[in-house]
Amino acid sequence: MPDALQLLKTRRSIKPIELDGPGPTASELDTLLTIAARVPDHGKLVPWRFIVFEGNARLIAGDAIAAAFRGKYPDAKPEQVEAERQRLARAPLVIAVVSRAAAHVKIPEWEQVLSAGAAAMNLVLAAHALGYAASWITEWYAYDRSVLTMLGLKDTERIAGFVHIGRPRGPSEDRPRPPLAEIATRFS
């Protein structure tokens, strides 16, 4: 396992289309989800949950995405609809991080949303630590209520992200990162 600081310094997103199998084993998946759940959670509300898409389930979910796309774009070409159907099949494993943030007497909803984001980031970092690559994305279907309903989300739940996990097809270059002088200030 890489040194923690080196791991954090080298993490980068890899496009889902650039991820191949094999994906994580059942044991590795348990590790990924366990680490994803170890995030700040003020009030112990567990304001997130996970939906795992692997194997044929990726295409079954893709059917809902394709149907919603056809509904929005009835003149779409068959190859466009098929591309939408393949959205969750681009990587061997996709995990949806679902935000269950809700009004609470003591815990601000914003803190709950941030906790879901932290769960998604932990998932990405855990994948990197296990030697996989990951991409945390949403895309249009994360905001389409018909797709969310088919995926089993309640009306009060939202997608924090779909984390695509697999093995990178080859080396990829890192993108330029902002200089610290442009993003960090000292309060005085």
Image: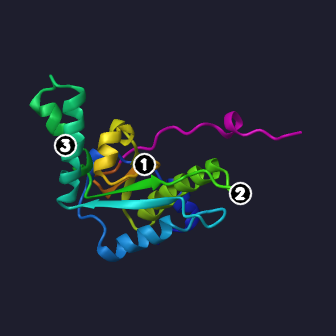
Residue nearest the observer in this picture, 122 or 175: 122
Residue at horizontal 38 percent and vertical 65 percent from the top: 131
Q: Is residue 9 visible from the viewing direction of this image?
A: no
Q: Quadrant of the C terminus?
A: top right
Q: Is residue 148 visible?
A: yes
Identified by mark 2, the residue type is: Lys
Residue that numbered label 2 is attached to: 106
- Label 3 sits on residue: 85
Above or below 157: residue 34:
below
Cα gap from disc 3 to disc 2, whole angstroms: 41 Å
SS of the residue at dot 2? Answer: loop
Q: Is residue 152 above or below residue 45?
A: above
| Residue 20 position (above or below residue 69) | below
SS of the residue under disc 1: strand
Q: Earlier in the sequence, mark 1 or mark 2?
A: 2
Residue 168 % position (x, y): 31, 54
Q: Which residues are magenta?
A: 172-188
**Is residue 95 a member of the stretch shown in magenta?**
no
Q: Quadrant of residue 166?
A: bottom left
Picture disc at residue 161: 1
Q: Amino acid at mark 1?
A: Gly
